[in-house]
Image (cartoon, helix red, strand yellow):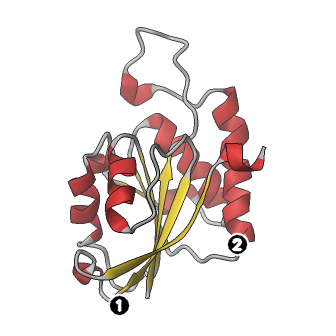
Amino acid sequence: MKSLFLIRHAKSSWDSPDQNDFDRPLNARGIKDAPVMAKKLVDRNVQIDAFFSSPALRAKQTCEYFIKAFGKQKEEIKFLSQLYLAEASVFEETILLLDNKLDAVAVFSHNNGITEFANQLTNAKIDNMPTCCIFAVKVEADDWSKFAKAKKTFWFVDYPKLIS
């Protein structure tokens, strides 16, 4: 059995209209929400073996809050350029190549692709993954290369407005 945690980056800043999208940081709300959501995930007593993130600043910063909450080092984050503004199909392509020693992985990325991918996994549908949303599924497989055909069961969804 494998576990997959899809996590949309926390709320980002639009304060500088001339700023490159890739370099947008978290805003005050994102800085507040990310550690709260990270702690909520830790409080579920889940194990995460690897953290994969889009290299965009807002995804990186969000992932750093989660990795800290899990007592790991920033250097353990694996940045994958294909996760930046990825289409739904890219998520599956990436997951199919994961190391089978990893039983639980967290993937930090962006809308619209992350919501589209989440909606392809199970019968549980979400109109839009809000910022800092966690969408978790259980995957009935011992091998990530079998992910595409494996049965996936919705586990939980959580996001800041569910707890505020």
Residue 119: image quadrant is bottom left
Most foreground residue, 132 or 105: 132
Answer few, some or many: residues within 10 Å of disc 2's Cα (few below 14, many 20 plus, some between 14 and 19).
few
Q: Where is residue 1 in the image (x, y as percent from the top left)?
A: 43, 88
Disc 1 marks a residue whose amino acid type is Asp
The reply, left or right, for residue 59 in relation to residue 156 is left
The reply, left or right, for residue 15 in relation to residue 94 is right
**How far apart, in angstroms, are the residues tagged by discs 1 and 2?**
22 Å
Q: Is mark 1 on a helix, strand or loop?
A: loop
Residue highlighted by disc 2? 44
Residue at the far right in the pictured view: 164
Residue highlighted by disc 1? 142
The reply, left or right, for residue 157 in relation to residue 81 is right
Disc 2 marks a residue whose amino acid type is Arg
Most foreground residue, 161 or 41: 161
Q: Residue at x 23, y 55 (%)?
A: 90
- Reading the chain from its start, which is encountered first: label 1 or label 2? 2
Answer few, some or many: residues within 10 Å of disc 1's Cα (few below 14, many 20 plus, some between 14 and 19).
some
Q: Which residue is drawn at 50% across and 58% down?
A: 75
